[in-house]
Amino acid sequence: MTVLAIRGLNVSFATEGGDLHALRDVAFDVPARRIVGIVGESGCGKSTLINAILGLLADNGRITGGQIVFEGQDLTRADAAQMRALRGPRISTVFQDPMGALNPVLSVGRQMRNIQYRSSLGRAARDARSAEMLQKVRIPDPEAALSRYPHEFSGGMKQRIAIAMALMMEPALLIADEPTTALDATLEVATIELLRDLQDQIGCSVLFISHHLGVIAELCDDVVVMYAGEVVERGTVRQVFRTPRHPYTARLLECDPARQSGRTRHLPVIPGDLPDLRNRPGGCIFAARCDRRGEACAAPQTEREPAPGHRARCILAEAT
Amino acid sequence: MTPLLDVRDLQVAFRTGPMLARRDVLGVAGVSFRLHPGETFALVGESGSGKTTLARAINGLQPISAGSVHFDGQRIDRLGRAAMKPLRKVMSMMFQDPVGSLSPRMTVRDLVTEPFRIHGVRAELAAETTRLLALVGLNDSFADRFAHQLSGGQARRVGVARAIALNPRLVIADEPTAGLDVSVQGEVLNLLNDLRERLGLSMVIITHNLHVVHHVADRMAVMYLGRFVETGQTDAVFRAPAHPYTAALLSANPEPDPDKARERIALPAEVPSLLARPAGCEFHTRCPWAQARCRTEAPEMRPHGDRHLACHFPLAPGARPPERDIPT
Ligand SMILES: Nc1ncnc2c1ncn2[C@@H]1O[C@H](COP(=O)(O)OP(=O)(O)OP(=O)(O)O)[C@@H](O)[C@H]1O
Ligand SMILES: Nc1ncnc2c1ncn2[C@@H]1O[C@H](COP(=O)(O)OP(=O)(O)OP(=O)(O)O)[C@@H](O)[C@H]1O
Ligand SMILES: [Mg+2]
Ligand SMILES: [Mg+2]
């Protein structure tokens, strides 16, 4: 079963210099009980995608085509009230910046109690549940932490509190936008394990964005690679990380400092810039930076399926 | 050679706790290190261990409760705002939170040229905008955008451009590449490295990405509960971590290979609170190697072979935790 299906999604932002086409024909599935990772260059549209799913695009942003089907319902047609009812209980989120989830003027305990507004539990039982969640994300002195305010915690602690708050509602889909960037390696690994456990316990699906390829490799079942607002490759983590079929994916993996065996001060990069999203090139979106481009790349590329479930938007991925 | 930065026994206290029982806790509990010109020093450690607080204290953004900070031979921890201002030109800070540290009402152009205005530095601002944006890999079309119209990584790059705008001698970078993809991360780190080579820039870099530390830092310090527990040359520490916390940290480092076998040193989840610091060695509550002495006697930071270490029982290279129940 598919919890979330994205089909031909297009999103634009109105800007001074014209429309910025941030997502083009994005399509992929998040199957039930699976963890799907999204990777891609900074600015490739990952956060925009999430905001579109949540109905939280900036005022100048607009869905110009496609469908976002969540549990059978097309969210691009849902009204504001329907979206409010979904956000939180059914689709919960953890963002890059934990302060987005935390209110600076309310104590952590108060905020965690507020989230449970639908619960039949009494106040003491809700606080106990909050403390239990804080314990799970390794906040020291969970009971005492409930009476503290967000600024009294370190960046990483705030992020873990945000995770605890998102997990408390047992959603069908958890969307996490770089939730572990602020955590040290031991906590990052612990958080990955925690997310796995939770996903297992409540049977939810997870859409997980991270720039840390190691974290994606450890946590995710499937991965979607985006470049300049397009999905260029998708498949299982093993397929994509072991045998990348799109040159962008291959280059991205090569740039990971974790893959440089010797110590080096000059890290590999992909030369060139993201294309101007206000004037998207007509052909392959990566062609300008691709060292394997040929004549065929001037035409728009379709997804090829070099192996079952492994898809890449590149002529080189044609099954041989 | 005078060190560029000399931090001695630095402490930072916070008032915290429930309303009626407010008390001081030490966010930084006595830290010393020196940084030489052109050197890159990495601070790693647990989330909440005091890295950002230490960085802010060095920069004069956070009052210190004990110890001293010298910059280029001059004591700077008692300087007021006005006396500190010219120093901020040569000692710049990149903040941990990229979007939150940029004022939303300013355009990218205003943001990257603000350091020139604050410090009254005359410059051709249009040309500087182009130069700085190009350095961080953003084209001119970004100049008129507002901070909230940027992706997380783009905001981070604007932060880098601001920090290097006035060619500082020291950059304290708090998670400079968090939220960047590996290619842009490489660009930012290569850029900082170029500045190091060309201008002798010194750097204190705080990051959770151990792969980054391995490549860019000359020396590193590992923090736990506001103290350094191990310092040394980066390659030596990576080759053979001697403090059990360092060993656990390095063993946790996620690798981009879905099939890689991982020999992790698991730590119990319970992170001690600053309000109730453990007796003895503060890591003993989570240390798989802890022994009776560790529970009562606090280890001092002392030289150990090629590094400094606060541990009664330094690990041999490649040590694995003993098979026994983890103490709680
Ligand atoms: N409100 C907006 N108005 C105009 N452009 C925007 C707006 N929000 C985002 N953009 C642009 O849309 C593109 C996609 O941005 P998005 O934040 O989705 O990227 P991202 O993949 O999340 O990047 P990162 O990894 O850096 O967080 C970027 O080029 C960004 O500058
Ligand atoms: N204003 C404050 N009031 C009370 N306690 C504080 C304050 N600021 C920080 N702390 C505490 O001081 C400790 C150190 O925080 P700091 O932000 O320096 O950690 P960090 O090492 O930078 O962590 P991270 O890696 O998560 O960013 C934490 O326990 C935090 O809760
Ligand atoms: Mg983003
Ligand atoms: Mg910090």
Image (cartoon, coloured by chain):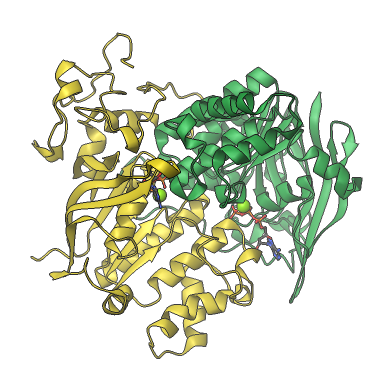
Chain colours: A green, B yellow
Q: Nearer the viewer, residue A319 or B108?
A: B108
Residue B142 percent location from the top left of the image:
61, 72
| The N terminus of chain B: image quadrant | bottom left
Above/below status of B275 relative to B31: above
- Residue A146: tell me if it is visible: yes
Residue B81 percent location from the top left of the image:
31, 75
Judged left or right of residue A315, residue A210 is left
| The C terminus of chain B: image quadrant | top left
Q: Nearer the viewer, residue A206 or B214?
A: A206
Judged left or right of residue B310, residue B213 is right
> In the image as oriented, which residue stretches furthest toward the front?
B20
Residue B43 percent location from the top left of the image:
30, 48
* Residue drawn at point x = 40 percent, y = 69 percent: B163
> In the image as oriented, which residue stretches furthest toward the top?
B324
Q: Nearer the viewer, residue B98 or A219?
A: B98
Q: Ligand 1 is in which quadrant of the figure?
A: bottom right
* Residue drawn at point x = 76 percent, y = 56 percent: A57
Residue B80 percent location from the top left of the image:
27, 74
Residue B110: which quarter of the image?
Answer: bottom right
Q: Nearer the viewer, residue B82 or B162?
A: B82
